[in-house]
Image (cartoon, grey):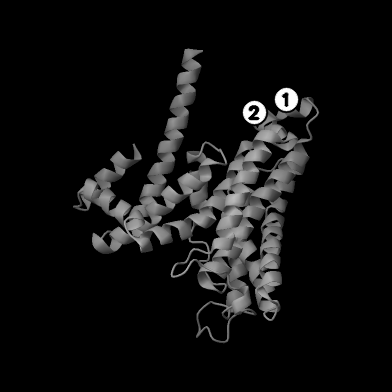
Amino acid sequence: MALAIIGVVFLVYGVNPLSAYGAIFHGAFGSIYGLSETIAKSIPLILCSLGLALAFQATFLNIGAEGQLVMGAICGSGIALTFPEWPAYALVPLMFIVGFVGGALWGLLPTLLKTMLRINEVITTLMMNYIAIRILQYLLFGPWKGKTAWGFPYTDIFSSSAQLPTIGGTRIHYPTLMIAIAAVIAAYFLVERTTLGLEIRAVGDNPDAATSDGINYTKVILLVMMISSGLAGIAGVGEAAGIYGRLRLGISQGYGFASIIIAWLCSLQPLYTIIVSVLYSGLLVGGEMIQISLGLPKGIIDIFNGVLLFSILAGEFLIRKKGRSEK
């Protein structure tokens, strides 16, 4: 449905839809550069969508991955700027740990508001995104503004020991990629093979029934949100130290919001997040390519994202309606 609707949009701009889809695929997967960029962009998407899939399974609608990513980037960058002389083997793990903690703590407040006061988590996690961005702006225009930034909202370049190694000639920061793949495998076993995973599924199916069966609802939501928010924080460290080598505005490029779509496309299944994230990243990279090759506006990909999300929601609605009618 999404492809058909966007095809009409392409026609309005005077572009053959099949040519546009072919250009997107070739731009994302038809060259070494395109494929490397697709993989690089998929890394934060894997981490964020994996965390959201876990939270959504427990029926906690975490819409705050964007802000949690930003806070992880801020905390990890703080370590890089404070201890620039440390060796990489000590500095990089500490940056990831602190980034995880920063993202997790940023998700703690809306979690407590949900579990203690029953305040809607959609509103609180969404608003926390904008607070995180404002904190980032304050730091980059204030105390952390780099001496070599030439008036731009950047920090100074991180020391070489704080920058993540990449696969030669690309922007694929493989330490974060390895963490993302390991996190996907760990999340699968967590959900499918552990008591906590059983409790997550039980809470997601029916919170009241799960509580009646002796499951501690507050504990489950707190744990799953710490994992969810922490993974987004790790993604933020990867972007700052692996892609840009410094902290800057636009550190996320909307990965936290895009991951909401990916989580639902995966049917909230951890193992699918790698495949879907790579394909979705290909859409982003290919979309950038067609802006140049076909002269299309940047907003065309934003339209694609919106139509895709509405198509997913429509599909879910029709499936549930069909199930009720069959019963």
Q: Are marks 1 and 2 in contact (CB under 8 Å)?
A: yes
Tell me: residue 195, above or below residue 73. above
Q: Which residue was labeled with disc 1?
A: 209
User: How many marks are shown on the rendered structure?
Assistant: 2
- How far apart are the alpha carbons under marks 1 and 2? 9 Å
Determine the residue positioned at 47% across, 15% down: 325
Residue 83: percent from the left, percent from the top? Answer: 70, 78
Determine the residue positioned at 69% across, 55% down: 104
In the rendered image, which quarter contains the N terminus? top left
Q: Determine the residue located farthest toward the top in the rendered image.
A: 327
Query: Counting other residues with Cα less than 10 Å from the Cα at mark 2, is it few (<14), some (14-19), or many (20 or more)?
Result: some
Residue 211: percent from the left, percent from the top? Answer: 77, 29
Does any portion of residue 192 appear in the rendered image?
A: yes
In this picture, residue 208 sits left or right of residue 12: right
Q: Quadrant of residue 146?
A: bottom right
Q: Which residue was labeled with disc 2?
A: 205
Determine the residue positioned at 58% across, 78% down: 155
In this picture, residue 67 sits left or right of residue 306: right
In front here: 148 or 207?
A: 148
Determine the residue positioned at 59% across, 62% down: 175
Residue 144: percent from the left, percent from the top? Answer: 63, 78
Q: Determine the residue located farthest toward the right in the rendered image.
A: 214
Q: Could you tell me the amino acid type at mark 2?
A: Asp
Query: Counting other residues with Cα less than 10 Å from the Cα at mark 1, is it few (<14), some (14-19), or many (20 or more)?
Result: few
In front here: 223 or 113?
A: 223
Give SS at disc 1.
helix
Q: Could you tell me the amino acid type at mark 1?
A: Ala
Q: Quadrant of residue 287?
A: bottom left
Residue 213: percent from the left, percent from the top? Answer: 78, 25
In front here: 172 or 135?
A: 172
